[in-house]
Image (spheres, rainbow, N blue to C red):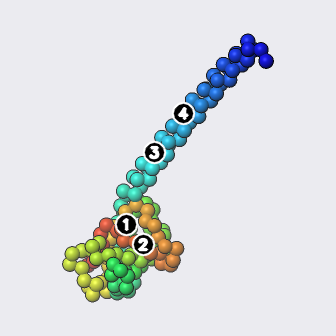
Amino acid sequence: MNLKKTLPLLAISLLVSGSLLACSSKEASKDKTTSSTSLSDSSKDEAKKGNFTAILDEDVSQLDDADKSYRFSLKNIEATSDPNDLKGILEANGLVLNLSKDQLPKDFKASDYKAGDKVAFTLSGHPAMTNSLPPQVVGDVVSNIKKVN
């Protein structure tokens, strides 16, 4: 093939390839920005705290796990603030909180928490819940729990 014909075709091919690479690089950068924005929004959701009150469905009991955590079986859950719209889920099925000793008040005694007692608790963000009835929540999303008179 003639060099005079090949050289312009090669130059055009390089220009088109370079343009396509530049466009795809901009799109990838745009996708990363969108992705980090989504993560930031998600982090904001996690920071939202909901405050609830509930009635103990049974006496608080200590679990036989490695942490010797405590089981709070709750019913009649009411929201005092619910920025994550959890009330519907909690209201319909109740909730079980599994809390370790370090998440409880310093003066906590399981014997002080009896069936029928009212408690107040705070949940951070959208907690992961088991698919059981009632659903169970791991304690790391519970920032406090206390008996209410």
Looking at marks 1 and 3 on the same chain, the residue that comes earlier in the sequence is marked by 3
**Dot label at residue 141:** 1
Q: Which residue is drawn at 46% across and 45% down?
A: 36
Element under label 4?
helix
Q: Which of 68 and 138 is in front in this view?
A: 68
Circles 1 and 2 in contact, beta carbons < 8 Å: yes
For label 2, the crowd category at 10 Å Cα-Cα, with few meaning under 14, some 14 to 19 and many 20 or more, is some
**Residue 66, quarter of the rendered image:** bottom left
Q: In the image, what residue type sits under mark 2? A: Val
Element under label 2?
strand
Looking at marks 4 and 3 on the same chain, the residue that comes earlier in the sequence is marked by 4
**Residue 20, quarter of the rendered image:** top right
**Dot label at residue 137:** 2
Q: Which residue is drawn at 26% across and 85% down?
A: 112
For label 1, the crowd category at 10 Å Cα-Cα, with few meaning under 14, some 14 to 19 and many 20 or more, is some
Q: Residue at x 57, y 29 (%)?
A: 22
Q: Nearer the viewer, residue 19 or 89?
A: 19
Element under label 1?
helix
Give how far apart the Cα atoms at labels 4 and 3 are.
17 Å
Measuring from the top left, give residue 7's x and y in whole percent: 70, 16
The residue indicated by pointer 3 is 37
Give how far apart the Cα atoms at labels 1 and 3 are.
23 Å
Circles 1 and 4 in contact, beta carbons < 8 Å: no
Looking at marks 3 and 2 on the same chain, the residue that comes earlier in the sequence is marked by 3
Q: Is residue 11 above or below residue 134?
A: above
Give how far apart the Cα atoms at labels 2 and 4 are.
42 Å
Q: Residue at x 73, y 12 (%)?
A: 4
Q: In the image, what residue type sits under mark 3? A: Thr
Q: Image quadrant for the C terminus?
A: bottom left
Measuring from the top left, give residue 59's x and y in whole percent: 34, 87
**Dot label at residue 26:** 4
